[in-house]
Image (cartoon, rainbow, N blue to C red):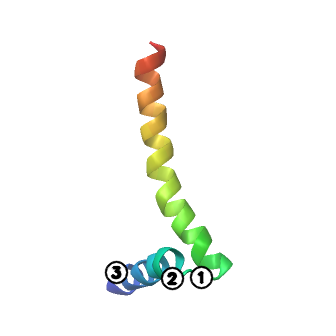
Amino acid sequence: MEHKLNTLKTDLQNVFVEGNANPIQMARVFIILAIPLITIFIVGARHIIY
């Protein structure tokens, strides 16, 4: 578990701070950020529509 967290921390740093991430790191960060945001948008839109 600690290794996965360190990998995630490294990916976030390479994507947002250093800007020299490879496509695999960018995909991991996208998935980690996209899933919660899509969930929030769906829940929020549900209240707006109904």
Residue at label 1?
Answer: 21
- 48 to the left or right of 2: right
Q: Is residue 13 above or below residue 43?
A: below
Q: Nearer the viewer, residue 13 or 34?
A: 13
Tell me which residue sits at (64%, 82%) in the image. Answer: 22
Q: Hey, which quadrant is residue 12 in on the image?
A: bottom left
Which is more N-terminal, label 1 or label 3? 3
Amino acid tagged 3: Met
For the residues labelled 3 and 1, say whether their Cβ atoms are less than 8 Å apart. no
Viewport quadrant of the N terminus? bottom left
**Labels 2, 3: front one:** 2
In space, the residues marked 3 and 1 are separated at their CA atoms by 22 Å
Q: What element carries label 3?
A: loop
Callout 1: few (<14), some (14-19), or many (20+) C-alpha neighbours within 10 Å?
some
Q: Is mark 1 on a helix, strand or loop?
A: loop
Q: In the image, which disc is placed on residue 43? A: none
For the residues labelled 1 and 2, say whether their Cβ atoms are less than 8 Å apart. yes
Q: Is mark 2 on a helix, strand or loop?
A: helix
For the residues labelled 2 and 3, say whether their Cβ atoms are less than 8 Å apart. no
Viewport quadrant of the C terminus? top left
Tell me which residue sits at (59%, 82%) in the image. Answer: 21
Residue at label 3?
Answer: 1
Q: Is residue 40 above or below residue 36?
A: above
Tell me which residue sits at (46%, 79%) in the image. Answer: 17
Residue at label 2?
Answer: 14
In space, the residues marked 1 and 2 are separated at their CA atoms by 5 Å
Q: Report x, y in % for residue 45.
A: 47, 26
